[in-house]
Image (cartoon, helix red, strand yellow):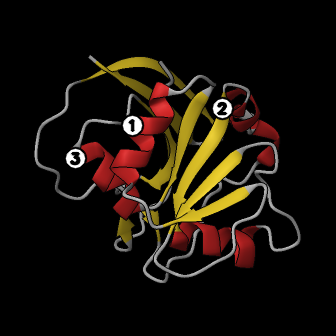
Amino acid sequence: MRKAVLFIAMSLDGYIADRHGGVGWLDGQGNDGENIDTYSEFVKNIDTVLMGWNTYHQIVTELSPAEWVYEDLTSYVFTHNRSCSTEQICFTNENPIDLLKALKSQSGKDIWICGGANLIEQLMSENLIDRYYISVIPVLLGGGIRLFEEFPNQQQLRLVKTQSYNGIVELVYEHK
């Protein structure tokens, strides 16, 4: 069965975006030569990406307005906005829990939960995230959009990998 994998970065104090929704702080201590390309390794095992409207909008307006960066993946964007789907991007107002359950039962590679916080919270509430790749960035934002808000039940995780570079600590957890 396919796994649902959260691959995301957060500040040391637990935020995925600053007070204005920005992510300009997503770098290490300043020496890019020390960075490791963990994304390229991660995405080799992914063929589908799920994200909310705000994450999609930030990608296409700020982070990569000239091209769709996930062109090799099937992308689902959860939204109530009416948008025309393309060959690469499916805009849907389907319940994320139902869609993820259906996708997990199909053959294929793993499914990346890209963001945002609301989507993550919904999937966590049903214990649907199998693996957590969390990069902790060496910055304290003091406010913004939290990665984890309250959810109904405790989840036991097992640490399977850590690595650090350029002040960034990557943590990989799986459900016990």
Q: SS for tag 1?
A: helix
Q: Look at mark 1 in the image and give the residue it sits on.
A: 101
Q: Where residue 96 appears, x then y in whole percent?
A: 39, 53
Q: In this picture, is 150 found above or below 56? A: above
Can residue 24 be seen here? The reply is no
Q: SS for tag 2?
A: strand
Q: Where residue 159 appears, x then y in whole percent?
A: 36, 20
Number of numbered discs overlaid on the protein picture: 3
Q: Earlier in the sequence, mark 1 or mark 3?
A: 1
Q: Where residue 59 appears, x then y in whole percent?
A: 69, 68
Kind of residue indicated by mark 2: Ile
Q: Which mark is residue 140?
A: none
**105 or 153: nearer the viewer:** 105
Q: Look at mark 3 in the image and give the residue it sits on.
A: 125
Give the left or right position of residue 64, taking residue 133 as reference: right
Discs 3, 2 touching: Cβ within 8 Å: no
Distance from the alpha carbon under mark 1 to that under mark 3: 13 Å
Q: Earlier in the sequence, mark 2 or mark 1?
A: 2
Kind of residue indicated by mark 1: Lys
Mark 3, Cα crowd under 10 Å, few <14 / some 14-19 / many 20+, is some
Give the left or right position of residue 138, taking residue 70 as reference: left
Discs 2, 1 touching: Cβ within 8 Å: no
Q: Where residue 47 appears, x then y in whole percent?
A: 68, 35
Q: Which mark is residue 46?
A: 2
